[in-house]
Amino acid sequence: MVLFIYIDTRMVKILRSILKKRGLTQEEFAAEIGISQAQLSRILSGKRRLSVNKVIQLSKITGIPLEKFYR
């Protein structure tokens, strides 16, 4: 359980950083990675996890190495 909390917290930090650096709204960013704004909002609030497939897609879109999401 602790590992999942760490991963989720790290993922949220990365996602928020991407939003800020790229100047995107949640709606714009969600559309870019293929989820709804509501889903992204739940991910950012810790109520939902991002699937592995979406993390891979996110890595490709942003150029952030996949391992950075999990370290």
Image: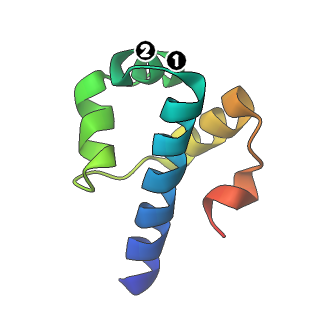
Count how many numbered circles sit on residues in the image. 2
Where's residue 10, x and y in %? 50, 63
Is 70 situated above or below 36? Answer: below
Using the numbered discs, state the Cα–Cα distance from disc 1 to disc 2 in whole angstroms.
Answer: 6 Å
Which residue is at 43% across, 52% downward? 12
Question: Mark 2: which amino acid?
Answer: Glu
Q: Residues within 10 Å of mark 2 (few under 14, many from 20)?
A: some
Q: Quadrant of the C terminus?
A: bottom right
Which residue is at 68% across, 27% downward? 61
Is 17 situated above or below 38? Answer: below
Q: Quadrant of the N terminus?
A: bottom left
SS at badge 2: helix
> Mark 1 = which residue?
32
Question: Mark 1: which amino acid?
Answer: Glu
Q: Nearer the viewer, mark 1 or mark 2?
A: 2
> Mark 2 = which residue?
28
Which residue is at 50% across, 33% downward? 20
| In the image, farthest residue toward the bottom | 2
Where's residue 65, x and y in %? 77, 49
Q: Which mark is residue 17?
A: none
Asked whether the beta carbons under mark 1 and mark 2 sit within 8 Å of each other, the answer is yes
Is 5 situated above or below 12? Answer: below
Q: Residues within 10 Å of mark 1 (few under 14, many from 20)?
A: few
Is 48 situated above or below 21? Answer: below
